Image (cartoon, rainbow, N blue to C red):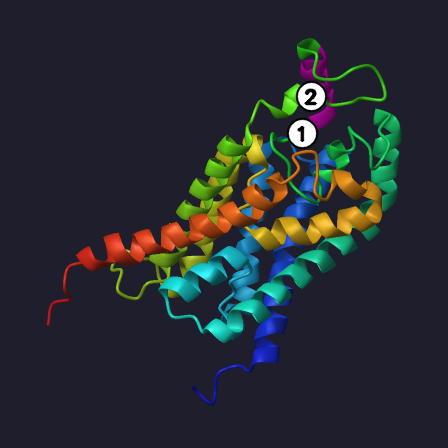
Amino acid sequence: MDKHAPNLPARCVAELIGTFLLVFFGCGAVHAAVITGAQSGLWQVAIVWGVAIMIAVYVTGAVSGAHINPAITVALWAWRGFPGHLVVPYIVSQVAGAMLAAATLFLFFGPLIEQKEKSLGVTRGVAGSEMTAMCYGEYYPNPGRMADPWKGYFDAAKDQGWIETSPPRIREDHYALVSETVAFLAEVLGTLILALAVFAVTDERNAEAPAANLAPVFIGLTVAILISVIAPLTQACFNPARDFGPRVVAFFAGWGEIALPGPNGRGFLTVYIVAPCLGALAGGGLYQKVIRPNFPEAST
């Protein structure tokens, strides 16, 4: 081991800080969109997530590698020789950073969330409160739109018979619009593409990869375009820490079973924890075993 390499506590703190930055800015943009209508469309939320990743990597990458995602940590362990004894400390640090960011956002936005719930006739912790809980954990299908979320959502939901009169309740058939299977596959594919991009832009053998100091930009943009496509289905997780940490905070902040396990039951586990890990493993393997071996040999 390189005696000049950062020690484990330093790496764990870096992962905590990096994941905090990611979730604070990313979930913060969701808060602003859902609670205040501050964003004008999904792309504005998506690009905030992308820039948050860039910032997190630039701030902490030199210390820990800025995995900021348990699925990426697992994939790097499986395919890039990341030390196995660091996997659990990294994941614990990532979840802790996500929880700290979510708790900070609840502290900042708490009164505004209460005001929003009153205006919607929503009681926190009962059916219908997914409409605010989505600021923390994720749901499939996405409970609302990112731009002027509730007016358009309620109009469409009432037309389709998904909700009844105030207080609004989402009927079970609403959740059938995106099945667990579809949500699972969407998260697998999204994280596969993310891992594929991470492995490609950080590979020193890849002659087409950007300069090392630009890799975070392309990883962030990859996440942004993935969110633009998949967020209407699953809110676009691709990161178990990003979902689970805030979901735990929401559970203790009053959403209870609406947050954990949520109206989809085991779906929070299969779609937002298992699927990203499988997708990252598949994406890393696809790059390492299928794409990378076909690179032309460097000329001498």
Q: Which amino acid type is shown beneath numbered disc 1? A: Pro
Residue 100 position within the rendered picture, expressed as x and y whole percent measured from the top left: 73, 60
Region of the chain picked out in magenta, as a range: 148-158
Q: Main secondary structure of the magenta part?
A: helix
Residue 141 position within the rendered picture, expressed as x and y whole percent measured from the top left: 60, 29
Quarter of the image with the N terminus in it = bottom left
User: Which residue sits at x=29%, y=58%?
Assistant: 288
Determine the image quadrant of residue 47. top right
Q: Is residue 271 above or below residue 61?
A: above
Task: Answer left or right for 41 relative to 285.
Answer: right
Q: Which amino acid type is shown beneath numbered disc 2? A: Tyr
Q: Residues within 10 Å of mark 1 (few under 14, many from 20)?
A: many
Residue 215 position within the rendered picture, expressed as x and y whole percent measured from the top left: 41, 59
- Pick out the residue farthest to the top: 159
The local secondary structure at tag 1 comes to loop
Quarter of the image with the C terminus in it = bottom left
User: Which residue sits at x=73%, y=18%?
Assistant: 154
Please say whether residue 250 is visible from this viewpoint.
Answer: yes
Q: Is residue 225 above or below residue 200?
A: above
260, 192: nearer the viewer: 260
Disc 2: which residue: 153
Q: Earlier in the sequence, mark 2 or mark 1?
A: 1
Please say whether residue 213 is visible from this viewpoint.
Answer: no
- Front label number (2 vs 1): 1
Q: Do the residues under discs 2 and 1 have CB atoms within 8 angstroms?
A: yes
Q: Is residue 89 above or below residue 174?
A: below
- Pick out the residue farthest to the left: 300
The magenta stretch spans residue 153: yes
The local secondary structure at tag 2 comes to helix
Disc 1: which residue: 143
Task: Answer left or right for 240 relative to 80.
Answer: right
